[in-house]
Amino acid sequence: MKKRIALILVVVLLCCFGLAACKARDEGEKNEEREELTKVTLNEVAHSIFYAPQYVAIEEGYFVEEGIKLELVTGFGADKVMAAVLSGDADIGFMGSESSIYAYQQGANDKVVNFAQLTQRAGNFLVSREKMPEFQWEDLKGKDILGGRKGGMPEMVFEYILKQHGMDPDKDMNIDRSIDFGSTAAAFSGGQGEFSVEFEPSATALEKEGTGYVVASCGVESGYVPYTAYSAKESYIKENPQIIQGFTNALQKGMDYVNTHTPEEIARIIQPQFKENDLDTIMTIVKRYQEQDTWKENLIFEQESFELLEDILDSAGELEERVPYEELVNTDFAEQAAEE
């Protein structure tokens, strides 16, 4: 009997040692996998549901699948994002591609090249202090409006729309161009302006607190515009083509997801990125963006879109001279990602 008990104890001990060894090996493999990930710092212009495909890619682990450990930083303004990219504080910048044109015009030694376009509609909405179910763009005449930072895409697209409706932004209304678009909601909530150009979730937040009401979509009104894109210094792209390709592959997977799933499914995936918002709010915003065809099917930044962007810059008086498409756009990585 004693021999039998001893034998059982030996078997139990061997099993324990085996399990411990397996666990140690599994932990070792996980640590090894973590060590193999390449750290990439991405500086985004704002943290917004407008960029849902990116957050899906993060939450679903698509970047990790491509061997990337993504560090996400919010720059709160395209000028700040571009500064981070140029200084090397960020490997990749996510912002309006007008910034790459500005940097090029200013003679940047290492030009910043766009390699993936995310959104094809403007993501901002016009918010009024009053409910205006019959709103017409001509209603803005003589009004005080928070337009966002001068030279930024929100402000330029807004003024482009005004001109399309036969209005002069400098004469027909008073546009405050001194406030960064990340701060306009707080200024509007604090009593500044009769209208404000807002991104989500700020537009919906203003509605929920009763401070303002969405009366028009700049995305619908302006048509297809290359609103945001990913870019990096030309030297970084040349030195790290595998990283850029993996990064683009992950984004394409995120893009595929938002184009094939319901607002509720998308909202549940990205909710950890927006803990300050409830699921219903996120779902409402995703649906609003999805219905206006915000996200491209692929990430290819086409020449026609780039030329439209330059038209908008020219209309805003921000373009010194036309920049050749090939100088600031590289579609190789997006094209390969779309084929996989």
Image (cartoon, rainbow, N blue to C red):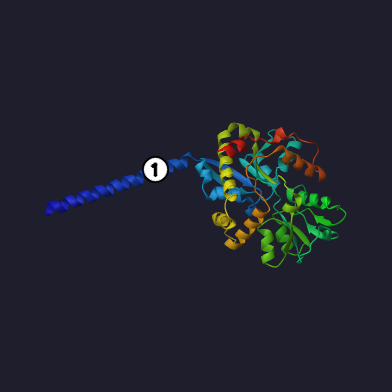
Residue linked to disc 1: 28
- Relative depth, front residue between 62 and 16: 62
Give percent across and percent down for residue 288: 66, 57
Give percent across and percent down for residue 324: 75, 33
- Residue 208's image quarter? bottom right
Tally the numbered discs: 1
Residue 329 appears anywhere in the view: yes
Q: How crowded is mark 1: few (under 14 residues within 10 Å), some or many (20 or more)?
A: few
* Quadrant that contains the N terminus: bottom left
Q: In this view, does 237 lie to the left or right of 107?
A: left
Residue at (59%, 39%) from the top-left corner? 338
Give percent across and percent down for residue 89: 62, 42
Q: What residue type is labelled 1?
A: Gly
- Residue 315's image quarter? top right
* Quadrant that contains the C terminus: top right
| Outermost residue, right side | 171
Residue 278 appears anywhere in the view: no
Q: Is mark 1 on a helix, strand or loop?
A: helix
Give percent across and percent down for residue 330: 66, 35
Above or below: residue 211 compared with residue 219: below
| Outermost residue, bottom side | 210
| Outermost residue, left side | 1
